[in-house]
Image (cartoon, rainbow, N blue to C red):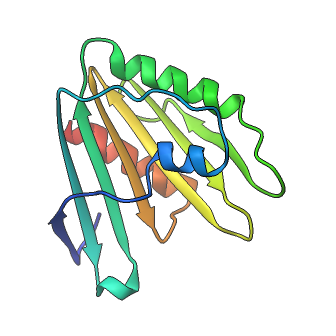
Amino acid sequence: MGSGYIAGAGAGGDWTFEFGAVALGCPRGSKPDPVAERGRMLRKGQPQDENFVLQHTGRYAAGEAARYLDEIRERVSACSPDGARSVRIAAQGFAGDESVLVVFDHGGGQLAKNVLVRKGDVLTEIFSKPGRSDSASRELGRKAAARI
């Protein structure tokens, strides 16, 4: 992440792919339950600065992480939000065994990017605020894959 970031526990909240998909009215799916999981937050500056990275990593039963990423691709392609909102896969195959960068446009310039990287049966999901460029988001995915 660079200097100045402090690690914290937990990564709960309304930042995941599942939350974004539901907010835009995308088809519902079924994220598998992890066998083991860990969440963390990296924050820079004061909480009100809202400069942070959230990450959730889980180990899933054999084949479940790959199946879930396939489902994400299907759900994004089948999603047709109303108005000026949208969702798209901006990049794939940039890290680990499999990876996707999903961009949610909630309208009014409100973008959210989720990076999902699978390596074996481990899947990690990353969200950052402020939003980073697609290139910087892919680099976060590559760094996460190297740590798995």
Where, quadrant-wise, is the C terminus in this rendering?
Answer: top left
| Residue 133 place in picture, x, y as percent | 56, 60
Residue, x 67% and y 44% (percent of image)? Answer: 25
| Residue 124 place in picture, x, y as percent | 32, 39
Q: Is residue 120 left or right of residue 20?
A: left
User: In which quadrant of the rendered view does residue 83 lie?
Assistant: bottom right
Q: Residue furthest top?
A: 62
| Residue 36 place in picture, x, y as percent | 15, 32
Which residue occupies the foreground of this view, 104 or 19?
19
Q: Is residue 96 left or right of residue 20?
A: left
Residue, x 64% and y 32% (percent of image)? Answer: 27
User: In which quadrant of the rendered view does residue 22 lie?
Assistant: top right
- Tag count in the figure? 0
Where, quadrant-wise, is the N terminus in this rendering?
Answer: bottom left
Decide: is 48 above or below 148: below
Residue, x 26% and y 21% (percent of image)? Answer: 121
User: In which quadrant of the rendered view does residue 48 lie?
Assistant: bottom left
Q: Residue furthest right?
A: 83
| Residue 28 place in picture, x, y as percent | 57, 32
Q: Is residue 81 left or right of residue 35?
A: right
Which residue occupies the foreground of this view, 35 or 87?
35
Q: Is residue 21 left or right of residue 52?
A: right
Residue, x 38% and y 76% (percent of image)? Answer: 51
